[in-house]
Amino acid sequence: METVKIKNQYWDIAADIHFPPGFDAKKKYPAIISAHPIGSCKEQTSGNVYGEALAKEGFVVLAFDASFQGASGGEPRYIEDPTLRVEDFRAVADYLVTLDYVDEDRIGVLGICGGGGYSINAAMTERRIKAVGTVTGVNYGRLMREGFSGYDPVGALEAMAKQRTAEARGAKLRVDDLLPSSPEEAKKRGLTEIDVFEATEYYRTPRGRKPHGANRSLFSHQGAAVGWDAFHLAEVLLTQPLMVVVGDKVGAFGAYRDGCEIIGRARSQKKELVVVEGWSHYDLYDKPEPVSKALARLIPFYKENL
């Protein structure tokens, strides 16, 4: 593995490149861009689980930290702006096509959770992406208009506007912690809905905790996400082969619902919804059995289409 920095506007994106066994820089390899979930980082599921597994199958996999998050640059920190997140994919594609060992005609993308929605949206207008895979992918804009705004998107936007005005006048930045501090705290607060609780179990315990997996968001800059739709124009612009992997234990973050929607809407001639039965959103992050079932479908998908 190699850690690199990729220029994106006025800051750098931090990324890990995972290489296949017996890597030879004189050869040409298919490449996969691996995108992490909301509030996550490249050292979690996108890199150390799916990235490593796909590299072992012969792909060069680049797992990156979103701008303003993780080890990537950008100020202020913890911005979760879909437009900027999608732009990251273009910068990463720019970098990949400069590498002599990457076949520019065989670049794919894999997105997990919110990274899945971003991957789908990026692929619509970034035609260097030739195949799209998602694991428990979520349309972050839809989620912001619903559960993440308490089903009051206009009220949330008004609060964001007031906070942004206060910060422009010198107030302290409001950075929200998106999860309880521990599973025990989640239970104490009655936050036992499957996705919320299992997110806490993943990010707030040694199971998945990493220094850069902060799960924090700058409240005053969330407005762009409320008005964004990961699937906008999919009927017209999403033409690449598409594989969407979801678990059938349905939770509040809505990956199952979003997966069904994008499969229905995508213009892609080759598209498939893979339902991993008996497993949940966060099981698909790192648990060996559901991950192996997801990879059993994703690996041949990428090999066929890249």
Image: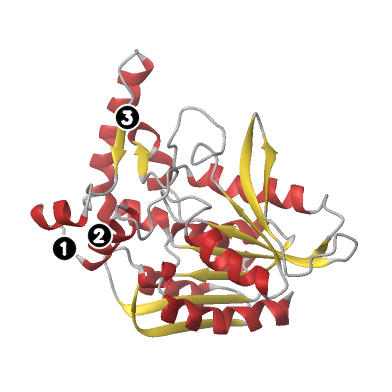
From the image, which quarter does the C terminus lie in? bottom right
C-alpha span from label 3 to label 2? 27 Å
Q: Residue at x 54, y 45 (%)?
A: 66
Q: Secondary structure at mark 2?
A: helix
Q: Upstream in the sequence, badge 1 or badge 3?
A: 3
Badge 3 crowding class, 10 Å Cα cut-off, few under 14, some 14 to 19, many 20 or more, is some
Circle nearer the viewer, 3 or 2: 2
Say the numbered circle drawn on residue 196: 2
Say the numbered circle drawn on residue 192: 1
Residue type at tag 1: Thr
Q: Position of residue 37 (x, y in %)?
A: 45, 56
Q: Upstream in the sequence, badge 3 or badge 2?
A: 3
Q: Position of residue 17 (x, y in %)?
A: 68, 55
- Work out whether residue 240 can be spotted: no
**Residue picked out by circle 3:** 161
Residue type at tag 3: Ala
C-alpha span from label 1 to label 3? 31 Å
Q: Residue at x 12, y 58 (%)?
A: 187
Say the numbered circle drawn on residue 305: none
Of 225 and 280, the residue lying toward us: 280
